Structures are given as C-alpha cells and as structure tokens.
Image (spheres, coloured by chain):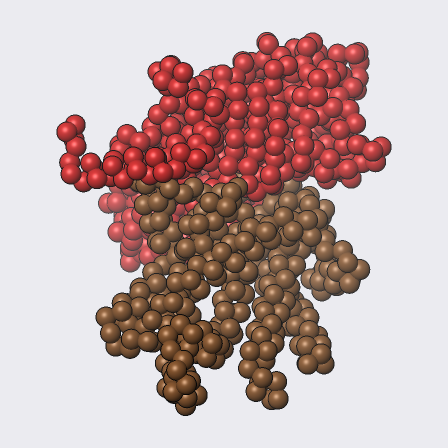
Chain colours: A brown, B red
Amino acid sequence: MLRYAGKRAILAVLVALTVSFAAFLLLSVATDPAAAIAGEGAEPEVIEQIREQLGLNQPLLAQYGHWLSAISHGDLGTSYYWRQPVSTLILDHLPVTLTLALAATFVALIVAIPLGTIAALYPNSTIDRFALTLAVSAQATPTFWLALMLIILLGVIVPIFPISGDATGWNYVLPAIVLGAHSVPAIMRLTRVGVLDVMGSDYIRTARAKGLYGYRLLSRQVMRNALLPVVSVLAVQLGHKLGGSVITESVFAMNGLGRFALQSIVGGDIPTVQMLVVLFALTFIGLTLLADLLNAWLDPRLRLT
Amino acid sequence: MRGGTAHNRVLMALAAVGFAMCGWLPVNAGPANDTMVVAIEGEIPTLDHLYTTARDTITLAELTDDGLFYVDPETLAYVPAAAESYVQVDDTTIDVTIRTGVRFHDGSPLTADDVVYTFSWVLDPDTKTNRGRVIGAWLDRVERTGPMQVRFHLKHPYPLAIRDMAFSVQLRKKGAYHPHGKADPNAQAQMLNGIGPYKVVDFQPGKRVTLERFDGYYADSPKGRPAIRHIVFRTIPDLSTQQAELISGNVDWMYNVPADIASNLGATGYATHLTGPTLRVNFIPLDAAGYTGADNPLTKLDVRRAMIHAINRRDIVKYLIQGDAEVIDSACHPLQFGCEQNVRKYPYDPAEARRLLVGAGYPNGFEVELWAYRERQAAEAVAADLAKVGIRVRLRFVTLTTLNQARKNHRVPAFFASWESGSTADTATIAEVHWSLKSDRNLSKDAVVARQMEAAARTIDAEERKRLYSAALKRIADQAYWIPLYTYSQNYLVSNTLAFPVTKDGLPRLFRAHWRANAVKASN
C-alpha cells in the first residue's frame, strides 16, 4: 500500500509540473503581465518599465527555469500584482475555499444521499420521479442564475442571509447551497443505483431472512456497500470545489482561491497562476488517491487487486 | 401602488418576517454608522499609489494621499494642496513653498525633507515605482532650499510638471521606504502613512479597505474637511450583487454602471442614479500609413472621410452611450486645454460617404477588420453603419492584451480605442501617446503632426501650445486620421441617503460626499 501511495505521489508531482509548464506557456503567449499590471490607460513607458522590473523581457525558457529553480529551494515567488509572497497569498485565500468546499459538499450529501436512498427504496414512485426531476433541474440550472435568485429571495426580499462577503459563517450558507446543488445530481443518482443494486443482492435477502429490517438493515448492510462508488465521485466533486468556484466566489464576493485564480490570470500574474495550477493539480491527484484508499478500506476485496 | 397590491403586500410581509428573524444581519452602511460603503468591481492590491496605476486605487489615493497640488474638480485648474505656493523661476526651474501645518497620519509634520525624499525615491530607477520613468523624463532633481522650500530642476520645459506633482507623486514621510534602514519598495503597500483627508485603519487586500477621517488634516486644504467619518471600499466583482447590496442598504455608492442598468435601478426609487462627464473619449484610428498593406483602402483620404460620414455618431450617443456623452469632432476631449474645436467636421451623411467611396475607386465598398476590446454594442453599431455604405466590417472583439500585441505587430487596420487621459484636462495627455512616431497607436505616422504635438509638450508658453495643438488637430481632422466618436459618461448609483457631487473629469472625489439632511435626521 505504501509503495502504491509513493508511486502515486511522484506521479502527482510530475503531472503538476507538466500542467504548470503548459499553463506558463499559454499564459506567456496569451497575456502581457506588464500591460495588465499597468492598467488600461497606462503610458507605454510605464508598461516597459514594469516589463523590465519583472524580468519579462528574458526568454521564456529562462523565465520558467528561474521559477523552477526557486521553488526547488522553497521560494514560491512574489506576486507581480499583489506584491506579496505567493505562499502568503495562497494561505490567505485557502480557508475561504476550504470552508466553502466542505460546506457545499455537506449540503450535497445531506440532500443527495437521503433523496437517492428513498428514491431507490420506492423505485418508480412519485418520490422517485420527484428526485429525478430535482436532479435534472439542479444539473440544468446555471450556477450564476441560481446564485442571483437566492440573493434576491433570501438576501433582498427576505433578508435572512448576507448577500456577499466571507466575514461570518452565515456568509457561506447561500454559496454552499449554490455550489452544493451542482453536486447533488451525480451523488443522488449513484446512491440510487447503488442502493437498488445492493437491495437486490443475496446477502440482503439473507439479512432479511434473519430478521434485519428497516434502518438497521439500511445502515449496517446496504449503505456501506452502496456508497462505494459515491466515495470516488465525492473525491472528484470535492477536488472541483477546492479548485475554487470562480462563478460562485465572484457572485458572492468571496475571497477564495477561485476568484483569486481568475484575478491572477486576468492580471497575467504568472508566479501566482503557476503555483495555483500546481496546487490544484496536486489537490486533485491527492483526493483521487484518498478515494482509492478509502474504497480499499471500505471494501477489503479491493485491497487484493 | 399606495394601497399596495397583493403581490407587494406579500413581499412586504415576507420582508418583515425576514427582518424579524434576522435582526443580527449587519447593515454597516449609511448615516446611522456614519459609514459610506463603496462597492468596486476590481480589487485593491496595494495602498501605495506610487506602485499602481489601477483606477480604483487612484480613487482611493484621492482620500488617503495628497500631492503638492490638487485639481479643482469644478474648474479643473491646478491649485496648491500640500504646497502653499510656487514660482516658475525660469523654463526649467520651479520653486515650491510647502504649506505649514500639513501632517502625516502618524502625526509628524510635512517638511521639505519629506518632499525631497519622495521625489528622489520616485526618480531612483532601483525603487521601481510605476511613475518613475514618466517623472524621470522631465525631472532632473529636487533640491531642498529651506525647511519648507524646495526647488525642482527640470530637464527641459515641461507644461505638465504641476499636473504630475498633483496626480502622480503622493508625498511620503522621509524614511517611509526604509523601515529598517534598508530600502523596501513594499513598505507602504499594506499600511500607508499619507497626508490625505482619510487614514487607513484596516486593509484586507482584494477584499476591503476601511478608512477613517483624519482629524489632523490641514484646515486650509482645497479638499476641505470631509463630512463622513468612515469610508469602506468593498470589492464586489459582480454588478448584480453590487445592486443587491445597494438595495439592501449595505452599499452606498457604486460606479462604472452601464447606462441602462443605472437608469432602470434609479427609476425604481431604491437608489439614485447620477450621471456625469469624464475626460474619456472614444475614437477609431485608421491605418493611413499602410501598415496592413501599402494599398489598403484606408490609405486613401476619401475613404477615411467616407467612413466618418457613414457613422451616425449622434444616434450611438443617444441610444447606446446616453448620459452626458457628446459627439466629438476633434482628436481630444473638448474640456482639455488646447483641444481645438474649429476643425473640419463630418456630419452623418451616408450619401456623401457613398459618393466619396465611388470617387476613391470603391463603388462596391470593401472589407476591413475593426478590432475592439470594449463596448461591443457601440462597435457593432459602427460596423452596421459602415455596412450601409458598403464597407463590410469584420469585427474582431478581443482582449486588450491581444489587441496590444496585434497592434505592435502592425496587424490592425482600425481599432476601437478609448482614452481617459489620466483625468487630465490637457491635450498633451492624449496627444503624445497617440501621435508620437514611436507609438504603435499612431497608425498615420504623420511627421508634421508628431512634431507639432511634441513641440507643444516642450514649452510652457500657453499661447504657443494652443497654436501648435490647433494646427495639429486641424490637420488630423482634415486628413481624417481618426474617426472621432464621442465623449463618455460616468454612471453612478448611490443610496438615497447620500449626496454625491459628480465631477467634470470623472474622477470621483469621495471626500465631497455627505449624508442628506433628512437621512441624518431619520438616523438620529
């Protein structure tokens, strides 16, 4: 198991570096950090001065080499735009995204798993149809639209929750609903399929024959096996959310990694974008690895393969 | 409406329930807390204006910083601020006397040493200020001539020296960038020690800046004493969210609002829609020099003139831009010094445009690329008007960076341009960057115009400058090097409790805002 995890970790670093190099090339070609930093109406002299200051007049490979050399020494660089160490900036923005991602995942779980389970227990019933409709609707609803509707309903007309910012826990309620809603369909469907599949299996029949019914049957025998595929999907969903939700964070004016990444891309802030790309890649790979390990823990049969 | 429809009653009941449930919801804006909350779309990365040219930071710097001079928003004239007076000793020497009683936010007095330190810091190329190169282009050195007197030695006569002292160089305390004896360009980025009417009490980069009125602000400042105690800048990237916060009473002021949205929300009565002019002008430079092909149609004078005749600029202003925007004929803003208005005019006349095209050898028109990075609707309206006379426009809507790169590589025959002149009411601020032979924005490469514009920027003789600009601008209009479009309008949305005087140059002076009398009474 340890060897497997080690291999995956090395693979993760290689993937992250490859992605960062691709991002660096694309960003260097597509943007002019000096012009972006100087602003729309800046004189050409100002732009040129910034270009020289940041070393952007050096060859691209040399620039990437400097960056690689610096991070190998633990120096994540300084943001062109914010004029602060990239490590400080990432640590400043991480808590918002982390909290939002976990809250959104929680929202998705408390809606999707009960709904999927009930839908499976009563297949083709009204509640099953309702769950299916909800799933399709949640998938089809644009994030920004849902966000604006919630703002109007629960922020303006009935001002229950704050509209924007990330100062208090209440600020996370609406964004978590918006972000979580997007994950509900996938988790709900997998839960439904998983529960249906398990409910038809021999060992459940045996368990029933032994007198195990209702909640005890569901919690002890059904869910543990039915939720195996959900764990993998959950890791992917959480990875997406930890990668930052640009739209949700922008609409709710939350200062998380998603909006920070967008600002950095628009501002041509190459050192910051580079580190964010590496961070996102590592997070994604890390979570996938975690999902594999969890699956192996939940299902001993997988450890043998 | 007075009696309330069923729908409204339901909404009001819901709102009442909501308020009852949620008395904890923080509403920090408004006269009750004497706090004006300002919503901005962009983020403020640094408090130090010497290290950024971002628009929102300039608005902030008007509150936290003062320069030696100040632009009176009513007259657009330069008046002494931290300076008490100045004397133009000769073409390249300016003596400035510093005002007594000006204090930094840490309580220390402003002296000649601070002024010399600030300008020397800006002039030092190693300090990497954003304005260093611009200031260094005309300023040789600054010399202390007394405890409250300094002398500026210019490299050559420069008419915008006072303007640069007003806009570009905010004064710093001696040693401000040497907190531990070692030079640190970021020393003022997070916690600023300025001399402006407000001091920074909290700064969360990218999120908010909280300002408090500076009680030690000098009484005879041309900015006056601000009425509002606290101002909070909040970054809210989404315009819809800004509006929701404004309606909810959590935001008092927002700007850069599209005209239709501003007028719609203003009409609801939830907020007040204000509109005012800016010094921004929009225009389309044409490739008269033949960079995109020596024989391209735009190299022909009649074609360029036909293009201006073909565009219904008045309707574009009336229906798309709205507000205080106006059609322009000259290559500058009418409020700018030296902006000659007596130039050749091209009224909307599609028939004349067609006649000119036939005369130029294009009876069936031609195809041309128009590059644009902002105001898509206006660019499309221009393209539609040109199509009516046979000029088939391929609109290339790209990012500013892409446009800059394409222009640098001479791939742009015409581009939808916009210039704000750094809120400066002087033609020099739009002229040099667009007409210098070194500038890639200059698609005409007219040596006569370039020489005249440069000469006007190298003399302090106001009459001579006017004469030179007049000659150059007449030639530009005569040769139709640009399609001059319109001035721009700034739309603000403010809470109904706030009075905000709009400015002529479009640069918001938030220290002039105050609560309406009835709002203060109600909050008491």
Q: Quadrant of the N terminus of chain A?
A: bottom right
Q: Quadrant of the C terminus of chain A?
A: bottom right
Residue drawn at the location 43% of the way across and 41% of the way down: A162
Residue drawn at the location 25% of the way across and 37% of the way down: B13
Residue B44 at x, y = what percent?
57, 39
A13 is higher (above) or lower (below) than B163? below
Residue B401 at x, y = what percent?
54, 52
Viewer-nearest residue: A19 or A176: A176
Residue drawn at the location 61% of the way across and 35% of the way down: B203
| Residue B219 visible in this rendered orientation of the protein | yes
| Residue B239 visible in this rendered orientation of the protein | no
A8 is higher (above) or lower (below) than A237? below
Q: Residue furthest front?
A: A211
Viewer-nearest residue: A84 or A139: A139
Viewer-nearest residue: B96 or B283: B96
Residue drawn at the location 39% of the way across and 63% of the way down: A111
**Image quadrant assignment for residue B12:** top left
Residue A136 at x, y = what percent?
32, 68
Q: Is residue B285 left or right of residue B147?
A: left
